[in-house]
Image (cartoon, rainbow, N blue to C red):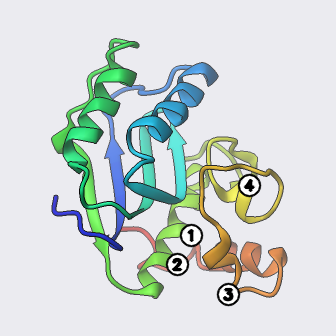
Amino acid sequence: MDFTVGSFYHLVYDHKGKLFDNYEHYYFFLNKYRVYVGDFSEVIAYCMLPDKFDFLIEIKDSNQDSLQQLQKLRNKIFMKYRKTLNINEIKAIELKSECDIEKTINAIHFCPVKAGYTDKPEDWEFSSYLEYIEMREGTLPQTSELKSKYSDVKEIRYNTESLIDSSDLFY
């Protein structure tokens, strides 16, 4: 993984088994993410499922060793719950266009529906979709840039839900 300042990355981790067993695990992960990765990145979108997580991040500080920070995150979170997470299995897909960023945000927000956990993206609590459609006031995702491109929340909702059938939406 080669992180550079101002770069956007879609971080994906699929686990062979459960990563998050209960609500406490999800919240613990998000809090530790802020501590260990928040210094050098901004979260644009995220979704955490029992066996997977997706984050779209923008790297803002190249002075931090990204892999070392992710390793700390792994150690602090998953060792507590005796879960194994191989840091080398986190896929980091660099996004180079606004179109790719927007598609990735939509794909991340639709993960719970695609995986069969819910019928609508807004029904999944561990996703930044709720911040984007203003059903929750969270502080982790940076939603202002994408929100500024739309006239209102209905347009964001429509955009996410209308692109779901697109074959190139999911990587």
Callout 2 environment at 10 Å: few (<14), some (14 to 19), or many (20+)?
some
Amino acid type, mark 1: Asn
The residue shown at (62%, 77%) is 146
Decide which of 121, 130 is in the foreground and name it.
130
In this rendering, the label closer to the viewer, 3 or 2: 3
Decide which of tag 3 and tag 2 comes sooner along the chain: 2
Mark 3–mark 2 distance (CA, rounded to whole Å): 11 Å
Amino acid type, mark 4: Leu
Which residue in the structure is indicated by mark 4? 130
Q: Mark 3 touching mark 2, by CB under 8 A?
A: no
The residue shown at (56%, 76%) is 165
Q: Mark 1 touching mark 2, by CB under 8 A?
A: yes
Residue 27 in which image quadrant: top right
Question: Residue 4 placed where, x, y %?
Answer: 24, 69
Decide which of 72, 50 is in the foreground and name it.
72
The residue shown at (73%, 57%) is 131
Which residue in the structure is indicated by mark 1? 106
Q: Quadrant of the N terminus?
A: bottom left
Mark 1–mark 2 distance (CA, rounded to whole Å): 6 Å
Amino acid type, mark 3: Lys
Mark 4–mark 1 distance (CA, rounded to whole Å): 12 Å
Q: Mark 4 touching mark 1, by CB under 8 A?
A: no
Which residue in the structure is indicated by mark 3? 149
Q: Mark 3 touching mark 1, by CB under 8 A?
A: no
